[in-house]
Amino acid sequence: MEGLSLRSRRIGWPMAAVVLTAAVLLVMLPQVSSIRYIVGSNMGGWAPNVNFTIWAQDKHFYNGDWLYFVYDRNQMNVLEVNKTDFDSCNSDHPLQNWTTGAGRDVVPLNITKTYYFISGKGFCYGGVKVAIHVENLPPPPASLPQKSDSPSLLLSTFRGQVFIPTLFAAAALWDAFILRL
Ligand SMILES: *[C@@H]1O[C@H](CO)[C@@H](O)[C@H](O)[C@H]1NC(C)=O
Ligand SMILES: *[C@@H]1O[C@H](CO)[C@@H](O)[C@H](O)[C@H]1NC(C)=O
Ligand SMILES: *[C@@H]1O[C@H](CO)[C@@H](O)[C@H](O)[C@H]1NC(C)=O
Ligand SMILES: *[C@@H]1O[C@H](CO)[C@@H](O)[C@H](O)[C@H]1NC(C)=O
């Protein structure tokens, strides 16, 4: 106990910084769990003249995430099709019609596969189409307790762990650094 208090006095502010960072990350965790992506966000939404390949290319979609299509309900719609119909912009036999009529459609990505979405009414030909490759979450590290019994819990546990070990590593580094002074 004596050693511990001596140590915490010597590493005063870095430890406080680490604790603060940990607190901030913990607060952020619920938002990191299932991610809801606005399709074409910052580019105009589900609309013509948006390159959805570019929009999707830097993102990792995991089973449990969501897509949110925001668009002009008088023009576009949201149809899930197979790859053949995606490539040819054929909207005659969608696998699923996600259009609700409000111009605000939510699609759960709850299957690990590549989803293909197009807008009918001719807009697919203008580029209103997106392929979304949904991956399984990598298994969480075995050393950490698996308290998850639902996909979203698993997700938040896993994505939280991306940050937490880094945090511990940073704390250990600070310790090593300060104690060597
Ligand atoms: C979107 O961007 C990609 C990568 O730059 C390009 O290969 C593709 O042709 C573009 N698609 C459209 C419809 O402009
Ligand atoms: C997509 O659906 C069409 C029509 O139902 C079918 O002809 C085609 O073979 C399907 N393509 C794939 C990749 O499943
Ligand atoms: C999709 O569903 C919407 C709302 O129910 C409906 O108005 C529309 O006609 C459907 N579109 C297709 C292509 O099935
Ligand atoms: C995925 O979500 C849809 C819509 O909520 C639901 O109908 C379907 O059963 C779900 N599929 C799986 C594999 O959970």
Image (spheres, rainbow, N blue to C red):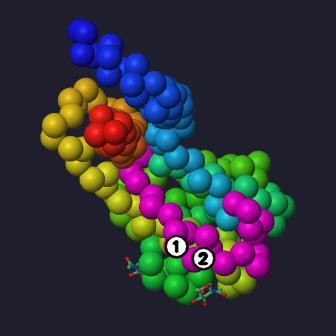
Q: Which corner quadrant of the figure contains ligand 2?
A: bottom left
Q: Residue 102's x, y, as percent?
A: 76, 48
Q: Residue 57 carries which label?
A: 1
Residue wearing tag 2 = 54
Please say if 119 is above or below 154: below
Please tell me whether residue 102 is drawn above or below residue 55 in the rendered image: above
In magenta stretch: residue 54: yes
Q: What element carries label 2?
A: helix
Tell me the amino acid under the disc marked 1.
Answer: Gln
Residue type beneath disc 2 = Ile
* Residue nearest the observer in this picture, 179 or 169: 179
Say what secondary structure mark 1 lies in: helix
- Asked if 41 appears above or below 85 in the picture, the reply is above
Range covered by the magenta-colored residues: 41-64
Please indicate, yes or no, whether residue 88 appears anywhere in the rendered image.
Answer: yes
Residue 155: assigned label: none
Mark 2–mark 1 CB contact (< 8 Å) = yes
Residue shown at 76% from the left, 79% from the top: 49
Ligand 1 lies under 8 Å from the Cβ of mark 2:
yes
Question: Was residue 84 drawn as part of the magenta stretch in this picture?
Answer: no
Mark 1 lies within 8 Å of ligand 1 (Cβ measured): yes
How many numbered dots are placed on residues in this image? 2
